[in-house]
Amino acid sequence: MIKLTDVKKSYGSGKNLFPVLKGIDMDVEQGELVSIMGSSGSGKSTLLNVLGLLDSYDSGKYLLGGTDMSNLTETTAAQYRSKYLGFVFQSFNLINFKSAVENVALPLYYQKVPRKERNAMAMDLLEKVGLTEWANHLPSEMSGGQKQRVAIARSLITKPRLILADEPTGALDEQTSREVMDVLKEVNKEGITMIIVTHENEIAAMTQRVIRLRDGLIESTGR
Amino acid sequence: MFDVDKWLEIFHTIITNPLRTVLTGVSVALGIFILVVMQGLGFGLQNGVYKNMQDDAINSLYIHSWATSLPYKGLNAGREITYKNDDLQHVVDKYDEVTTYSGRMGMWGVAMEYGSETQNFSLRGVHPGHLELERSIVTGGRFINAGDVADARKITVLGKTIVEDLFRGKDPIGEYVKINGVLFRVVGTFEDPGSKWENRNAYVPITTAQRVYGRNDQIDMFMVTTGEMSLTESIEMAAEIDAYLKEKHVVHPDDKRAITVNNNNESFAEMVNVFTGIRTFIWAVGIFTLLAGIIGVANIMSIIVKERTKEIGVRKALGATPASVLGLIIQEAVFLTTIAGSIGLVAGVVLLEVLAMFIDHEFFTNPTINFGVCLGALILLIIAGALSGLLPAIRAVRIRPVEALRDE
């Protein structure tokens, strides 16, 4: 599913060149539930951005589903993201003037799916995460756990092959975190590959494999 | 292609900050309002002046004489030049294009008497062609005809003001007026809508005027039409006449005062140029005013883009292409400017319509603008909107989706 070979990335230029990823080799199988752990500054967020085609890398090779992901234009990157990837963020990143159902349906808007059709699909997913009654509420009217479940529903609507979650429970209490993780595990059971970036050991413990990052290098692959 | 979601988003951003939207809208509306009103005023001035110019036939030459300003061939400066019948006859015979002509011989402060009323007016000896050249309208009876001139009949055609002042509502046709002690039969009345002063004239056959006042074959000035001549041809004709008259009356070729040939064709063409210039200037002023509005919209759009950085990043993470982000911002800017501009456009047109109702001055009539100017202003607005959205939109496109992941 994912294969990274000697992926390097630095920020800045010239004398101020600051290497963040110093040669990452990793692979993730189809259907795996993997967590990436590391202290702040270890490069885990940058790695997730590279995996999510949100950021470019300097050298090395990134194969996603067997396709080389180097030198993508913004438009093709957007198309790949739209087709293959789903995102779950720490701060939910819902659009605050759209209702839950509209937020969930938004990715399909960029795939030019008609409004009725995509709203129906969004309702199905909201039912799945137990938020049917909240479909027409704005994010500001919901709790953190509910917002994150909306965000998960949103990440699922394009039927992605890979979901990338960046500290998905970072803003939630213990009880809610567990609920959200249950939903993510549920999703993973349906065969969707999932990579979760976290710094919490309890969260990492709920995944099948923990990849540890230190100072821009893989410390352990968890295998 | 009507995209409900896009429009909902545009309405949302516009409604979230109504004060900012209104202030920006006002600057654009004001720009287009000023443009439209100034164009309208320009047209009003133009219409007024054109109407005034059409007081006289545009395709005509008016040939005046005055005292010489340069000594020539042993003759001193200051010698009065007076035209004679044969000067006019020469021009009429030489140019086939001359369809109408008239000499003119005038007297001011002439006592005119009817019944118990006596008042001073002007008297003018003219040819039948004077009617067309001066663009007067016969309001009763008839104008002077060729027979009147040939026989030097003592008949007269009275201007509107004389009729009102002397006859006080009575029909003057067939009545006799005593002009400087000589009885003239009134055969017609006229009105000159272009000039109030013309209405204080009593026209008589030129031959009659020459005879009564002992002027023999002299005329004060004369005028001829130039028919279908082009501007260049008429300028050439004017120059030829000028040269001929100077030669004949022994006037220095450089004397600009003694002989003048006014070419109305040329004056009109010059006036057209002047107005084209004024209108261009007004467009320039209007466009600069509008530019200030555009900068306002560009400013508000870039603030919006800045505020929505995170949202745009999220959208990109969810699969929004650069083109769709660009489209969203530009569409919003175009929408804002078009709505605001249309309000300004309508307000401007309404103001002009109201002005048109109340103002009808000699030099200012009908200040409405035409459909073409409205259309031009609208096209300008849409282009302006797109331009004002362009820079902020490019900035939005440059936002990297990574921004969305960064938690403050």
Image (cartoon, rainbow, N blue to C red):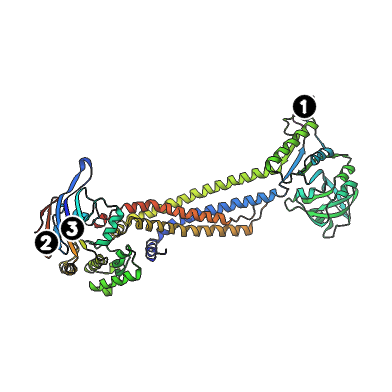
Tell which of B179 and A133 is nearer to you: A133
How dense is the environment of label 3, judged by Cα within 10 Å: few (below 14), some, or many (20 and up)? some
* Residue B71 is inside the magenta segment: yes
Earlier-in-chain disc, 3 versus 2: 3
- Chain holding disc 3: A
How dense is the environment of label 1, judged by Cα within 10 Å: few (below 14), some, or many (20 and up)? some
The residue singled out by tag 1 in the image is B72
* Residue B329 is inside the magenta segment: no
Q: Which mark is residue B286?
A: none
Which of label 2 and label 1 is nearer to you?
A: 2
Main SS of residues in magenta: loop
Tell which of A21 and B406 is nearer to you: A21
| Residue at image coords 58%, 53% | B40
- Chain holding disc 1: B
User: Total label count?
Assistant: 3
| Residue at image coords 25%, 74% | A127
- Give the residue type at disc 2: Arg
**Helix, strand or loop status at disc 2:** strand
Q: Are the residues at dot 2 and dot 1 in contact (C-beta closer than 8 Å)?
A: no
Instruction: Tell me the quarter of the picture where residue B348 sits.
Output: bottom right
The vertical placement of A206 against B132, above or below, is below
Which of label 1 and label 3 is nearer to you?
A: 3
**Helix, strand or loop status at disc 3:** strand
Magenta region, residue range? B68-74
- Give the residue type at disc 1: Tyr
The residue singled out by tag 2 in the image is A209
Q: Residue A2 carries which label?
A: 3
Q: In this orientation, does residue B322 appear?
A: yes
Which of label 3 and label 2 is nearer to you?
A: 3
